[in-house]
Structures are given as C-alpha cells and as structure tokens.
Amino acid sequence: MKSFTQKAIDKYGGNKTRLMDILIAIQSEFGHISRESVSQIATELHMSEVDVEQTISFYHFFTLEKTGKYSIYLNNSVVANMMGREEVAKAFEQEAGIKFGHITPDGLIGLYETSCIGMNDQEPAAIINNQVFTKLTPFRVKEIVRDIKDGKDVNDMFSASYGDGANRNVLVRSVVTNNIRKIGPILDPEYKVGEAIKKIIKLKPEEVIHEIKNSNIRGRGGAGFPTGLKWEFCRNAQGDKRYIFCNADEGEPGTFKDRVILTELPRLLFEGMVVAGYAVGAEEGILYIRYEYKYLEEYLENILQAARDKNYLGNDILGKKGFNFDIRVQFGAGAYVCGEESALIESAEGKRGEPRDRPPFPVEKGYLNQPTVVNNVETLCAVVKVILHGGEWYRSFGTSESTGTKLLSVSGDCKYAGVYEVAWGFSVNDILDMVGANPKKIIAVQVGGPSGSLIAQNEFSRILGYEDLATGGSLIIFDNTHDLLTEVVLNFTEFFIDESCGSCSTCRILPTILKNKLEKILNARGVMKDIDDMEEWGQILKASRCGLGQTAANPILTSIKNFRHLYEEKIQKSKDYDTGFDLSKAVFEACEVTHRLPNI
Amino acid sequence: MSKPIVATTSLAGCFGCHMSVLDIDERILDLIHLVEFDKSPINDIKHFTRKCDIGLIEGGCCNSENVHVLKDFRENCKILISVGECAIMGGLPAMRNGIPIRECLEEAYLNGPSVKESNQIKIIPNDPELPIMLDKVYPCHEVVKIDYHLPGCPPRADLIWDALVALITGDELKLPYEVIKYD
C-alpha cells in the first residue's frame, strides 16, 4: 500500500492541488484510504493530516473505513423509488445478507445508498466498482450477487447487451442507454470535428467573444449568466494564466443530459473548450466530471489523445502560432455542491468542495486564484455551433430572452423518458404531450430538479425559458398515484440535508428543522402554525452563501405554494398548538435497555 | 385585585436558576407583596393547590417525570417561562444527546471504571418507581408550549426580577446590555 500511495503521489508531482486525483487512485485500488496512507500523503505533500482527512470526509466516495471488495451504491432518488427501488434494495439486502450501510463479514460486498447518479431515465440504477448497472430488478440483483460471489470482474457481469450508441464503444462497454428522443442543432450527429477551430484561428479572440455575445447564449447550468459576457470579464481580468473549466458535475437530481453529451459528443464539447480557451486566452482546460461517470474515463482520455494527435489540442494548434491549449479530466468524488462553480474550483484544487465568498468571482480569481471561466457542458457545445453558423442563426431558435435550444432530461411518469433537444419557449403542456405523458393523470412536474419548483396543473401553461420557468433541464413528471409530500418533498429535503457542505449555519440547520416539521405533519401531529412557520423560516435560507443553501427550502416552499391543500389535509384542525412530542417514543430505547415496561 | 400566583420547578437543572431567584436579595420582601407562591421548592409546596398565573421552569426534560411535571405546569399556569439555558436549549445535560441512551446507561452502570467491579450482577436500575430516561434531553418548548424565555446560566437575578415585575405590572421589560451579557 505504501508503494502504491507513493506512486500515486509521484504521478501528480507531489502537488497538493492534485489531492483529489491521488485520493481517487488510492480509494479505487484499496476500497478505502487507510490512516497510514493519510499520514504518508500529509508528509509527502507538506500538509497536516487533518487537511487530508477533511478532504476525504467531505466526499461521498472517499472512505477511511474499508468498503466491500464490491461496493454497491444504489441510487435513492425519487424516480428510482417510483421505478421499484424498494424491491431491488430488499433483494440486495436479502442476497448479500446485510443491511444497507454495512459490509459482509468476509468483506466481499458493501451496500451503500447514494444520491441521484444521472440515470433517471433508466432507474433503478446502481454503481458497482465504478460500473453502472441500470434498470435493476430483483431477478437481476440475484444474478449480480451470484456473479460477485463467483468472483467475476464487474466488467464481465453484464448479461444483457450493451446500451446504444457510444455506450457500446470498446472503451465504454456499458449498459447505460442514451435515450436521445429528439435532436436539434446541438445533438445533430452530422457534426464535423475541428471546423470551428479552423474558423476561429482566422479571427481575433475579441471577434469570437463578439459572436458569442451576439448569439445571446446564456449559461445552460441553470443560473443563465450570459456566456459572452463571462468570457469577456475573464479575458479582461488581471492574471498570469487563465483557465477554462467545463462543469460536468451534473448533480441536480433528474438531470442526465450532460452524460449523454459526454457519451455521444465529447469531441464537440472539447472543441467548445478550445474555442473558449482561444477567446479568453487560456492555455489549460479542465473537464470537472462527477465520479458517477467514471466509467467514461478511458473513453474520454482516448478521445483527448486523438485530438492531441490531430493538433486540435497541444501547442500551436492547427498551425496558429502561440495558440496553445490542452485539456485534462478532473474527477469529483460525490458531492452535489461541487456543481456550484466556486465549490467546483475548490474541489479541483484538492480541497473540500465548499463554495467561496463572492466577489471576487471566478472570472477574476478562480482556479489557483487566476481568472477562470466555468461553463456548463451544454453551453460549451452550443458555442461551437454559434461559431459555425453565427450568432444570428442561433438567435433564430427560442425566444428573445432565451435564445437557442435546451436539452431536457425528462423522467418520471411518461412513456418516453430521455433527452430532448427543444427550442426555448415551449410550455410544460407541450413537453408533456411530446414525452407521452397522460395530461389528465399528471398532477405535478418538478422543473429544474429539487432546487427548482414543483408545479401543479394550473401552471402547466408556463413557458420554459429564462423569462418564465428557468431550468437546467430536469423535468420529473408525477401522476396521480403518488403521495407528493412523502415521495417527493421529503426525499428532496433529505437530499439537501445530506449534501449541505455545512459552511453556513442556515443551510446546515434549517433543512433539518424543516424536515422535522414536515415529518410532524406527515405523522398527523401538525398544526396550521407549522405550515406558516415553514413558509416563514424557509426564507431565512436565502442568506446562505451558495445556490444550494439558498434553494434548499424550495421543495417545501414551492409545494406549499402550489399544493397547500396536501398540507392542510394532514394537519389537526382542533388544535392550534402541538409540539409533536411523543413520550412513548422518547422512552422506548431506555425501556429496552433496562427491560422495563413503559409505565408512563 | 388579588395577587398573581407564581409556581416554580426545577427539572433537569442544577437549581442554579432558583438560587438566582433568591439572589434578588432584599427585594424578596417586595416580591412577597407583589405575588403569592404556590407549588415551588422555595416554599416546599409539592402539589398545585390552585390555578396559577405564572410558571417558572428551570431545566429541560431528561426523564418521564420531568415531562409529567412540565405538562402539569402547562395545565395549571396561564403563562410558562423557560428560565435559563437548560430549559431553553437543554444545557449541560443535553451534552449526552450525541450519545445513544443505551451507551450512556451501560457506561454509567455496567462498564464505567467506578462500577465495573462493584456491579457484579450487571444490572441497570429498573425499579418501576424510577422515572424512565428519555432518548435525549429535550428543551421545554419541544414538549409543551412555552410563552417566554429568560436566557442565562443562570439568568441574572436582575433579569428575573425585572421580567417578573414587567410581566405583573404590564410595563415594558428593559433589557440593558449588562443584564444579558454573559462573558
């Protein structure tokens, strides 16, 4: 273990900003990061042990305790539950003979829960030793556990055929499917690699930025900041070096379109990063990609190498003197908050993914304190098309405020879950019609994931776009068979509790208090004041530092706003005050320990 | 007008807050002119003899008896005041809240260095007469409705005095910095 750790440290030049990569290597090799490794890393990187430990403890996929030889991470998102996760989880527990959160006595199998892994259109899904298994059934679980007990390699455990498109690529070999349902200018398969690079090297960087500004394209991650402006700020900022980050963290439950782009159109994405690099004056691009997509690593590295071979990356790109740009892949290790750009940068520097105070913004002081652009995967793909066809062409799609197209990740109660590329400006009703959802039965749509809003039928006529319903592209559809408060709102609130980085007291504490209130209402102990309290207290979260904290009450706030009757049905009408305290519950454990009857 | 009736109790507290009540010194004579006391450790009345106006609660709830007493106070007092850190937040007793009650009891009666040898029969006290420990220490407002909170550990005598007088006379409570300064 000592020599492997040393090798991992040496591979990254003993550079402590590459701590994530070192830890990922050790975790993958040994299934945990031992105390000895921690002190070895600390010594070699000239850090304190607690600094190493605090990074480890921050990420879901790093552990100080040993995990199983086969670590099974079963997704516990809303849609997974809708698609039969409970049966699958039971089957895993039964076959492995352990509960979730434990490993078998022989150390073979570890069962863990994990947040949305970007497979909402093919749930229930699990990650086993970095390979993704989708559409699980209790029968399939039996097969998998049998294969594990036979000692099969995880790559040899797929019994069905591989997924569609590049999922079949020899370097991917995954059962994941793309489910591309509708293509548009971005998902257009006719794309020719390198045309945009050939075009920009004839232009000045300022002209490239001008064209992007002309297209009015705004960030596709959800916040919608104008891309051209971001590039310009970065270009004009003081700094020795500049960096282009592609944000492929895609942690918002219900979103999976970036996974499809990374699978089908990675060259388009990389070309977009090159364009951004040229425009901004950066020489290094970093693709920050969530750990859940680790199965794409070899494939992506291979494509990057091919791009270097063709001089799309490297020095003096396509003969343009002084135009140097290269891309490296940086994996995360399981943290939703790392999708926030400053947290993502912190993480890429090898630290806990805690959002920074702003200003300064990343365009001024980002990665290694240098001017940095962080763009979403989809944004970087779109800019290539803008360069090829012009800003005016791009504006011909969508609305005046929201130009272009948007990739939607659609899942839940509909016939055709998957990825759709549509122009901005369609209503939710249009989308429901397109994806084969029965409009009479649909009672709610979660727009933009847990941080977005849960809307009811009366809002289905609203328009997707920055001017009305802004969204990073996740749409989860619920029909009338679901108990929204238990299945959706509670699940999302628990998600926010799990994913809080703990920096701001608002986001560390309030979601738990709100969840307790919600559970009190679900347990029929709620009163009207609880609903009012939740509405009022939810506002306090707006004081949090980052988007995660600011939106952590959204599942509760938007469901109270749009589905207030569901709350009011459950509260006690005869009381106006109830603490919800239950004495028999409170004494239960002590009675057990002392073998007493609760004579209360 | 008859005098307002005050009741007090100490739940999972240290009686420090009651000491602080006595710390109002000679003003206790004024207090007797202002109020009457019912159930309270100060006069050793064990049970409520009538409905009261103000209940002062020291300490949070760590066992079933605390809960019963607190509920009894809620039923018999028009206004309930959480007095001091333990009643408001759980205080020092709540330091056990991070540890499961099973571990606490086993450490206290079975495994602790002072009991390991002496408790040969390995028994955790379980007489039915004993109150049952709660899974954690609860602040009072998580058990019943509390109307006011007087902070401090203990709240200064001046704060208790001023608060009571303000409540009884209906005057505004003045909270000068010195009275709520704790360091």
Image (cartoon, grey):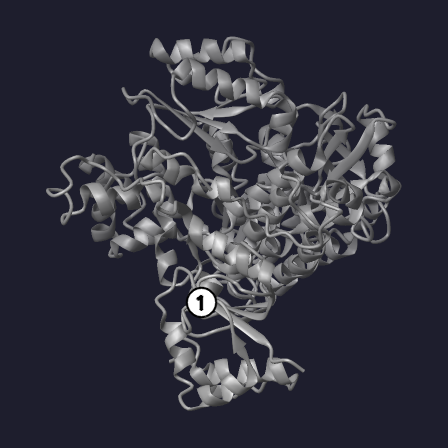
Left/right of residue A521 with respect to residue A239 in the rendered view: right
Left/right of residue A224 with respect to residue B30 in the rendered view: right
Identify the residue at horizontal 45%, vertical 86% (top origin): B28
Q: Secondary structure at mark 1?
A: loop
Answer yes or no: is residue A46 visible.
yes
Query: x and y percent of residue B67 in the render?
Result: 48, 52
Query: x and y percent of residue A90 in the render?
Result: 50, 19
Left/right of residue B97 with respect to residue A360 in the rendered view: left
Identify the residue at horizontal 59%, vertical 62% (top origin): B76
Identify the residue at horizontal 76%, vertical 47% (top origin): A573
Q: Residues within 10 Å of mark 1 (few under 14, many from 20)?
A: few
Q: Which residue is mark 1?
A: B45
Query: x and y percent of residue A436 in the render?
Result: 81, 23
Query: x and y percent of residue A379 in the render?
Result: 67, 46
Q: Nearer the viewer, residue A284 or A174?
A: A174
Is B141 placed above or below A71 here?
below
